[in-house]
Image (cartoon, rainbow, N blue to C red):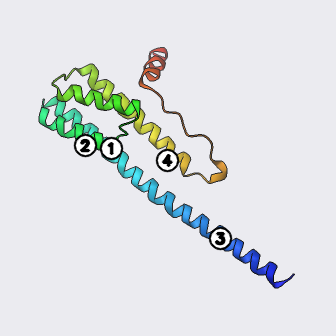
């Protein structure tokens, strides 16, 4: 075996190792940040419940701002969550809307968790991104299950 073949295979092995470790570091960082992000959403959701119970419109306004910074302003399902918060801060504290808010946030958290698990898999096990279940689909499946 020639010296150039040995050196060439060593360089290739080094590049593969470097790429693998870079991906691992990036995934660990992203996964950790998303875990923190989901924790914030959970905490803020409880804060919404507390603000509704205490009828604190000023707190609901703050929470709308905080959620608008956590959610995707171009995603229809995220916008639906923000729209519910707009209703709450407009003094529409309907309990059915509150339940819908909780369900929508739960579906969002479940979807993000599924995405995080999928993305943490090795590249050769990756498949398409998990589908996010709409609130309407959730309701129709929930009604059929009961």
Q: N-terminal of the two: label 4 or label 3? A: 3
Q: Is residue 35 above or below residue 136?
A: below
Instruction: Verify CB contact (< 8 Å) between mark 2 and mark 1.
Output: yes
Q: Position of residue 86 (x, y in %)?
A: 23, 29
* Residue 123 vertical position relative to residue 50 in the rendered view, above or below: below
Q: Are marks 1 and 4 in contact (CB under 8 Å)?
A: no
Q: Earlier in the sequence, mark 3 or mark 2?
A: 3
Quadrant where the C terminus sits is: top left
Instruction: Please state the horizontal and vertical placement of residue 39, each as a whole percent of the image.
Output: 34, 47
Mark number, residue 66: 2
State the SS at label 4: helix
Which residue of the protein is positioned furthest toward the right in this rendering?
1
| Residue at (46, 43) in percent of width and height | 113
Query: Quick one: label 2, few (<14), some, or many (20+) residues within 10 Å?
Result: some
Image quadrant containing the N terminus: bottom right
Q: Callout 3: helix, strand or loop? A: helix
Residue 118: x and y in percent read 55, 46
Mark sitting earlier along the chain (2/4): 2
Residue at point 72% right, 77% down? 10
User: Which residue is denoted by mark 4 in the rendering?
Assistant: 116
For mark 2, give the secondary structure: helix
**Residue bearing the label numbered 3:** 15
Q: Is residue 23 left or right of residue 78?
A: right
Disc on res. 70: 1
Seen in the image, is 49 located left or right of residue 41?
left
């Amino acid at each position: 075996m020639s010296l150039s073949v040995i050196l060439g295979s060593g360089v290739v092995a080094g590049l593969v190792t470097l790429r693998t470790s870079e991906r691992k570091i990036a995934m660990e960082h992203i996964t950790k940040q998303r875990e923190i992000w989901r924790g914030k959403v959970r905490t803020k959701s409880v804060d919404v419940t507390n603000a509704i119970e205490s009828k604190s419109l000023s707190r609901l306004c703050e929470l709308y701002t905080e959620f608008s910074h956590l959610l995707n302003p171009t995603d229809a399902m995220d916008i639906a969550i923000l729209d519910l918060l707009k209703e709450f801060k407009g003094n529409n504290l309907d309990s059915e809307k509150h339940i819908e808010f909780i369900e929508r946030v739960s579906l969002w958290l479940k979807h993000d968790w599924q995405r995080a698990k999928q993305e943490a898999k090795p590249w050769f096990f990756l498949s398409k991104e998990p589908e996010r279940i709409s609130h309407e689909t959730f309701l129709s499946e929930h009604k059929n299950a009961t």
